Image: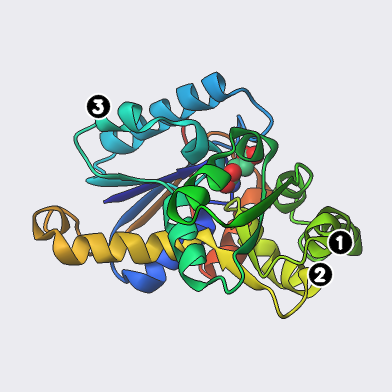
Amino acid sequence: MIGVFDSGIGGLTVVRSLMEHLPGYDIVYFGDTARTPYGTKSPETVVGYALENIDFLLNKGSAIIVMACNTASSVVAESAVDQFDVPIFEVITPAVELTVKHSKHLRIGVIGTRATVNSGIYEKKIKALSPGAKVYSTACPLLVPLVEEGWVKKPETTMIIKKYLHPLKVRQVDTLILGCTHYPLLKDKIQRKIGKKVDVVDSSTAVAKKVKAFLDTHAEVDKQLVKKGVFRLFVSDVTDQFEKTARMTLKRNVELEHVKT
Ligand code: DGL
C-alpha cells in the first residue's frame, strides 16, 4: 500500500493526485483529526505526531509513505525519516523544484501554516536551487480551520484569502506556492485573488508526479505495492463534516475507520 498522512482533510488532495497519476494502486490514509491543526503546534509536538503516524501506516502494510502535510514535512528531519526502511516522501521539495524550473522572474510567494512559514524551509530550499530568487512568505492560519469546517465556498473565506494575499500581490510575485495541502481545496479562490497571471503551484500534484517517477525507476519497490484499487481511510476522530468534505474532494463514497491516538 501507499501510506499517506496529514493532520486532517488536506492530505486527501495528495491522495486525489496519487489516484490520478497512479490509478489502481492501493492507498491507506490517516487523517489525524483529533489533533488537527498541526500548524499552530511546536515543531517537537508535530515531529512526535508524524513519527507515530508513520508507524501506524507501516503497521497497515505501507511499502512507501507520503507525508501529505507541509507542516510535518517542514519539521521532520531527514535523519528521523532515514530510520525507517521504506521510502518516505515529503511535499516541499517537489513543489520547490517545479517552481524554480518554471518561475520567469523568480519572484516567489509562499503561503502556509504558521509552523511551515516559521521553519523557513521553503526559502532555504528555493535559495539552495536558485540563490538569486526573491521569496515572500505569508502564514495563513485561518485557512485550515475554514477548510476543515467545509467553508470553501463562503464569501467570508474569499475576504480572508484576499487579506492574506495582499502583501504578496504588492510584491508582484509571479509564482505562488500553496505550501499547505489544505489549500488546493481553495485553489480557484486563491487564483482569482492573486490574479490570473500568477502561476499557482499545487504541492499535491508535484509530489504525486515525484512518487510516480520514483516507482517507474524502482521496480523492487513498485512490485511490493498491491494494485487492486483498495482505499482505506482512517481518522482519529470521526465527524460528519470530514466525511462530507472527503467525499467532495475524492468524488467517491468513503468509509471512515476510527483509530485512537
Ligand atoms: N495540511 C497541512 C499542511 O500541509 C496541515 C495543516 C495543519 O494541520 O495546520 O501543513
Q: How far apart are marks 1 and 2 (CA)?
A: 6 Å
* Sequence order check, earlier mark of 2 and 3: 3
Instruction: Judge whether residue 260 can be spotted in this image.
Output: no
Give the camera-side residue of 207 and 109. 109
Instruction: Identify whether 68 is placed above or below 206.
Output: above
Percent x, y of residue 166: 85, 59
Give the amino acid at mark 2. Answer: Lys
* Tag 1–tag 2 contact (CB < 8 Å): yes
Q: What residue is drawn where x is 15% and y is 63%? A: 217
Q: Which of 257 and 58 is in front in this view?
A: 58
Kindly indicate the quadrant of the structure image that contains residue 229.
Answer: bottom left
Q: Which residue does the numbered mark 1 point to in the structure image?
A: 162
How did the renderer colour the structure?
Answer: rainbow
**Residue under label 2:** 193
Q: Nearer the viewer, residue 78 or 151?
A: 78
* Relative image position of residue 144 (x, y in whole percent): 70, 46
Q: Does mark 3's beta carbon lie closer than 8 Å to ligand 1?
A: no
Q: Residues within 10 Å of mark 1 (few under 14, many from 20)?
A: some
* Residue kind at label 1, given as amino acid type: Lys
Q: Is mark 2 on a helix, strand or loop?
A: helix
Mark 1 or mark 3: which comes first in sequence? 3
Judging by the rendered image, the residue that carries numbered circle 3 is 83
The answer to whether residue 65 is above or below residue 248 is above
Q: Which of 135 and 256 is in front in this view?
A: 135
Q: Mark 2 Cα within 10 Å, few/some/many (few <14, many 20+)?
A: some
Tell me which image quadrant ligand 1 sits in. Answer: top right
Q: So how many labels did they put on this image?
A: 3
Image quarter for residue 219? Answer: bottom left
Q: What element carries label 3?
A: loop
Query: What residue lies at 58% left-to-right and 74% top-to-bottom?
Result: 104
